[in-house]
Image: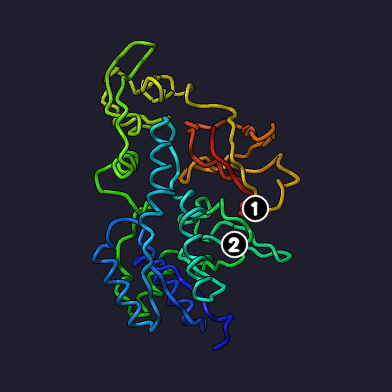
Amino acid sequence: MSGNKRILVAMSGGVDSTAACAILKDQGYDISAVTLLLKGEIDEPSRLAIADAVEKLGIEHSYVDCRNDFLQRVITPSALEYACGRTPNPCCLCNKVMKFAALLDFADACGIQQIATGHYAKIVRENQTAFLARGSDSAKDQSYFLYRLPSEVLSRIMFPLAELTKSDIREIAKKAQLKVFDRPDSQDICFAVENECCGETLRRLAGLEIKKGNFLYQNKKVGSHNGIHLYTIGQRKGLGVALGVPAYISNIDPVTADIELTTDESFISVDSFTISDVVWNSPAAPEDISDISVKIRYRTRDVFCRVERDGDIWRVTAKEGGFRAVTPGQSAVFYSCDRLLGGGIIC
C-alpha cells in the first residue's frame, strides 16, 4: 500500500473515534490507532471497546502516556484561571497545546504524515491552505473547540465525521459489528468527575488551595461560599442564597474572594466586550470583520457583531441585541456563515 494511505487515528474508546477508524478502513487507509492517556487509568469499558475495534478492524494500536504533560499544560493552567475568578475552556487549550501536538509528534515518530480524529468539524482546503468550518450536524459541531489550531496543523488532519450525524455514526459502527455502537456519549470534558463541577475537579487535580469568601448584594454580605472556583459570571442556580427573587453572579473578585450578586438580569447583559490572545485562521485578520458572527460559549447562539482592533486587544460589539453573561476566560469564536475565522480569550 502506498505511503500516502497511511494515517494515524486518535481512538478514545467512544463511538465517534471508533467509527472514524471504520470509515477510513473502508476507504482503504492503512490505519495505526493511538490512545492518549491524559488522566488516571483508562476505564474498563473504553479499554474493552478499543480492544474489540482493534481486533475486528485489524488495525495497529498503541497507548501513549501523556498524563504528566496534560497536568502541566492543561489542568494546572486552567485551575489557575479559576483561582483568578475566570472561567477557562480547557478543551480549547488542550486541542492546541496537548492533544494534536501529541498526535503529530507520535505520527512523526512513526513516519506518518496524516492524522484523523472523531471530531464533528470540516476542513476546507483552498490554495494549499487549510481552514476550519462547522460540521454538518449542527447539534454536534465541535469547530468551536478547535479554533486555535493553525493552518499548518489543519493541513495534516482529516475529520471523517465531517458530513455525518450521530445516528449515521452509530449505524456505521453497528454495521461493522463494533460493540461500541450503542455506548452512551461521553461528557464534553474528558476529565469530568460525576457529581463534581469542573472548577473543583481542576483545583483538586492541580492541588490548589480554596479561596472562600462572601456573597455580596448591594454591598452587603448575604451569604458565604466555599470557593470562587465553583462559580461563573451569570450563574443563577446553586448559589444557596435566598433573596426572595432570582439572583445572578455579576462579578467575582479574585483578591477578596467576594462574589457580587444582582437581581436585575440586565446587569449581566452588555453591548460589547474585549478579547485578547487572538488568533486568525489565516496569515492576518480577515479584510472584512465588520459583519461576522461570534459564539461566546459552545452552546450559545451566534451573535452578529463588529470587531475592532486596539493594539493587542480587540473589541467585539453586537450588531443587534447584545451579549448575556460574557465570561472572562471563555473563548469568543468568530464565523462567516459556516467558515471559522478565528477567536480569542474574553478579557
Three-letter amino acid code at the position of disc 2: Leu
Which quadrant holds residue 197? Answer: top left
From the viewer's perspective, is 217 left or right of 107? Answer: left
User: Which image quarter holds the C terminus?
Assistant: top right
Q: Residue at x 65, y 35 (%)?
A: 312
Q: Quadrant of residue 222?
A: top left
Element marked by disc 2? helix
Which residue in the structure is indicated by mark 1? Answer: 281
> Within 10 Å of the Cα at label 2, are there few (<14), some (14-19), or many (20+) other Cα atoms?
many
Instruction: Give the number of marks.
Output: 2
Labelled pair 2, 1 in contact (Cβ < 8 Å): yes
Point out residue 193 in the picture as x, y percentages from the top left corner: 27, 48
Which badge, 2 or 1, is on the more N-terminal residue? 2
Q: Residue at x 38, y 31 (%)?
A: 235
**Amino acid at dot 1:** Asn
Q: CA distance from mark 2 to mark 1?
A: 10 Å
| Residue at (59% x, 61% y) in the render | 153
98 and 189: which one is in front?
98
Task: Give coordinates of residue 17: x percent, y percent.
Answer: 41, 68
The residue where tag 2 is placed is: 154
Q: Is residue 224 above or below residue 12?
A: above
Callout 1 crowding tier (Cα within 10 Å): few <14, some 14–19, many ≥20: many
